[in-house]
Amino acid sequence: MFGKKKQPPIRSLIGEGTVIRGELRFTDGLRIDGEVVGDVIGDGSQPSILVISEKARITGKVKADHVIISGQVIGPVQSDTLLELQPKAKVVGNVRYEALEMHPGAVIDGELSPLQVEEDRPALKLAANSSNP
């Protein structure tokens, strides 16, 4: 409806008070309320959604199609479809995205860059006024 794709269901939860160490790979959807020390990666064979709640903390790489951050991520973030940074989000690391929605209050300490630079887009040219020497 209205051109939006149906989100995959959130099938897994890492609860508050839980600490996981090591790489975490998931399919469909994952919500993190606890802490992960290691990479959190969505399976690229199908759409994935990752929700990082206000109470969550991730130290490692984050990669999924749709990423919603309300908590803290220390490490690079890549969102292949949409990255949503909620008001209490804090990211320390470089961020790559296809589309970005950033709310006031969200903080990024790193470089923001789109996944693909449009090659069809003409280079920026400054208009010069030739009548003024």
Image: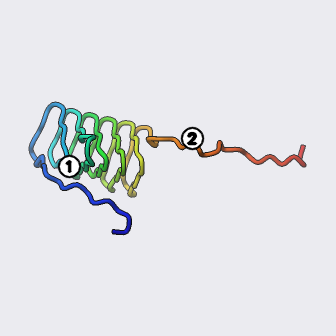
Give residue 68's position: percent from left, percent from top: 29, 52
Give residue 28's mark.
1
Q: Residues within 10 Å of mark 2 (few under 14, many from 20)?
A: few
Residue under the point 28% across and 39% down:
62
Residue under the point 40% across and 55% down:
101
Compared to residue 105, the image places residue 115 above or below, namely above
Give residue 123's position: percent from left, percent from top: 65, 42
What amino acid is found at the position of numbered circle 1 in the picture? Asp
Q: Residues within 10 Å of mark 1 (few under 14, many from 20)?
A: many
* SS at circle 2: loop
Residue designated by label 2 = 119
Residue farthest along the bottom direction in this orientation: 1
Q: On the rendered structure, is 79 left or right of 121?
A: left
What amino acid is found at the position of numbered circle 2 in the picture? Glu
Which quadrant is home to the C terminus? top right
Residue under the point 16% across and 49% down:
33
